[in-house]
Image: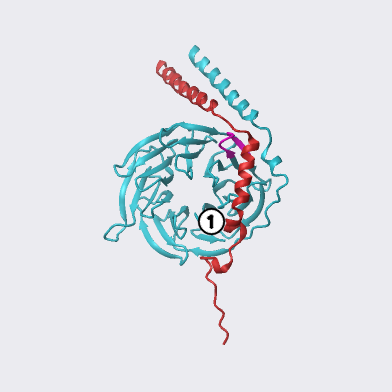
Amino acid sequence: MGEMEQLRKEAESLKDDITAARKAVQDLTLQDHVAGTAVVGRVQLKTRKTLRGHLAKIYAMHWGTDSKLCVSASQDGKLIVWDSYSTNKVHAIPLKSSWVMTCSYAPSGNMVACGGLDNMCSIYNLKAKDGNVKVMRELAAHTGYLSCCRFLSDSEIITSSGDCTCLLWDIETGTEKTVFAGHLGDCMSLGVAPDFNTFISGACDFTAKLWDIRDGQCRQTFGGHESDINAIGFFPNGNAVITGSDDASCKLYDLRSDQELITFQDSSIMCGVTSLAPSLSGRLLLAGYDDFNCNIWDTLKAERVGVLSGHDNRVSCIGVTPDGMACCTGSWDSFLKIWN
Amino acid sequence: MSNNSASGVISLQKTVKQLRFEAGLRRIKVSQAAVDLKTFCLQNAQKDPLLMGVPSSDNPFRPPKSCALF
């Protein structure tokens, strides 16, 4: 028992050290630094396209790298690949399990992946020679639901799970290469860094963690949220991380100073954040909420500068095109909307 | 009972090891981080379509409508 007590004391002491080290570099706050910067003017985006076709709640969407094609996943048991310019459905892929929670488009455009309550990540080949889209691999090892997945390439994918871990997979062999363990609650979301060397995960233990993809090491842990983190994403320059939580706030954590710099919250917002995406320059933060709306925040000034309203149910997913031209919202109302 | 405390010790040892690693991180000053964040936003503002607005001639989601006057 003596050893447990000693270890507990050491853990507390180290936590105090980290808090002190973070405070020691707080020579100025971000608010001080941007005091002279003007808030961006009101941002009014219009729905340019509505993608209709799903028959049940949409849980996830992800843009392809061409900023034109995107994939969406619905609990109607379908993955649909859309041409967002024409609103045509390029592929409508029936799933073995309709309890899908996430989907991802490979950077090459050759594959899509999805998963959910089946605890598996299914990889689909879009470019099979016979023209039929079929399952290429079923990645099974997680002991909990698949909450998020993101391709690194055609041969590697990272998944996050309700079993509190994230995994790096070799798609070719269908096996796990690296386990990322450390979260004390369901992992809900993940984001890959622009340089593909690290990724971030948000979990139901209210923390976000930064991981080294190659050696599996958790480099940094960020706390401060008062409830589950549902959404996470990198600031476009890779130096900061943005989280969205059931505590109704989003937070921006800077990686190099290892601390929270801003909280995006408003007393009038009392529902959870479900999804988020920064604009191309990072100046705007688009966040989807349980109250059917999407709020647009000025990232530097932490002020709300716009709202996207038009869905008749929760906004469950949001994504900005890689070229920054538009954002897409997906909702439990079964529709996807493209805005700019 | 002893099994529980053994795994409890191992788990705590891992926690302490991780905290030691995180405590050893080299941190830059918040002022520097703030400058870089702001600079990145301002430098890329002009190239940000959602921020600047998209003229309909350049908007792939909004093909310009032709006006037919008969």
Is residue A257 rendered magenta in the image? yes
Image quarter hosting the N terminus of chain B: top left
User: Left of A178 or right of it: where is B42?
Assistant: right
Q: Nearer the viewer, residue B34 or A62?
A: B34
Q: Which residue is mark 1?
A: A324
The colour of chain B is: red
Residue placed at 55% from the left, 75% from the top? B65
Image quarter hosting the C terminus of chain B: bottom right
Q: Give the x, y percent position of residue A14.
A: 56, 22
Is residue B53 rendered magenta in the image? no
Q: Nearer the viewer, residue A295 or B18?
A: B18
Amino acid type at mark 1: Gly
Above or below, comparing residue A54 to residue A22 in the picture: below
Residue placed at 41% from the left, 56% from the top? A76
Q: Is any part of residue A1 visible from this angle?
A: no
Magenta stretch?
A253-262
User: Left of A300 or right of it: where is A143?
Assistant: left
Q: Give the x, y percent position of residue A139.
A: 34, 43
Q: Which secondary structure class fits the magenta region best?
A: strand
